[in-house]
Image (cartoon, helix red, strand yellow):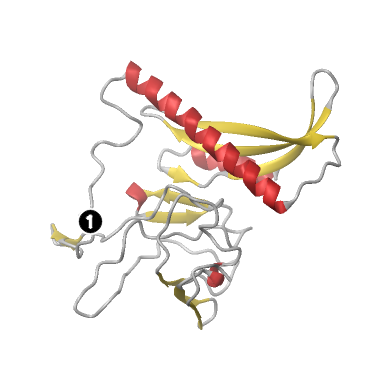
Amino acid sequence: ANKDVANFCDMCSRAAVEAVGETTIVQPVVCADGVQLLVLSLVGLCRLPTTSLVVVVQESLGEGFSSRISAATKSSLVERCRLALAEVCERLQAQAAAVEPGTDGEEEDEERIPECKTAEVEHGQRRPAFKFFRQRLQNHCILTGGGLTATRREEREIQNGCMVFSDRPVPPSSAGLAFSLRVDATASDFYALPLLGFTRREPMDAPGLYPEVSHCLGQSVLVGTGSKAYAREQHEHF
């Protein structure tokens, strides 16, 4: 867990990183008065116009290092921490904007992509038809390049935790639905990645967006993991 947090902080220190999925850690804590607590910490990135901050939000899981909670309770606490993180980032960004008028924590010159249109040709190159949905990322996902590039943290140790969705429906063409991507780098530690496909589920900043296992995504058709294909009609994840 400490290695995960150290890697998270290292990624956040890189100027090219624009968004990164929050990570959580459960650790024993001894308070100043000697009380022993088991604490859930959510670690997230807050981008400001001139710097980036790593913000930690904590929730107590109970007294004593042997405290136990259910998976549902932990999920609820994580969501509470995410809401608190969003509030803290909003306040910090508002303070930064007050100090430097004209900034709101987002890049003003970021290229805008037309809604639900086919990719246009600009300067001899096709403009991307969509970016990656960034409002809720999995815990090992990093976005760079204006939201057009997704990278997995700890790519040599972890083989999951980096599912991404397009931020809008795939634009139709005369050939039907299609998209293309470019692989900039690969790791040789794992085999048969990535997994690609389509889903009718609209990405939303809500619990349950991602399945426990990638190929169990609801309302999807996916291909990958060693020339295998997966399909699921039901909205719920398998």
Q: Quadrant of residue 5?
A: top right
Confirm whether residue 9 shows in the render: no
**Quarter of the N terminus within the rendering:** top right
Q: Where 174 falls versus 157 (above or below)?
A: below
Confirm whether residue 81 shows in the render: yes
Nearest the camera: 187 or 199? Answer: 199
What residue is drawn where x is 58% and y is 43%?
Answer: 79
Nearest the camera: 112 or 63? Answer: 63
Nearest the camera: 68 or 163? Answer: 68
Q: Is 164 displayed left or right of 26 in the figure?
A: left
Nearest the camera: 142 or 99? Answer: 99
Q: Is 2 displayed left or right of 46 in the figure?
A: right
Q: Which residue is mark 1?
A: 115
What residue is drawn where x is 32% and y is 69%?
Answer: 180
Q: Position of residue 97 (x, y in %)?
A: 33, 22
Q: Mark 1: which amino acid?
A: Glu
Label 1: which secondary element? loop
Q: Where 121 falls versus 133 (above or below)?
A: below
So how many labels did they put on this image?
A: 1
**Quarter of the C terminus within the rendering:** bottom right
Disc 1 crowd rating (10 Å Cα; few below 14, some 14-19, many 20+) is few
Q: Position of residue 233 (x, y in %)?
A: 47, 77
Q: Quadrant of residue 201?
A: bottom left
What residue is drawn where x is 60% and y is 32%?
Answer: 56
Q: Where 78 falls versus 159 (above or below)?
A: above
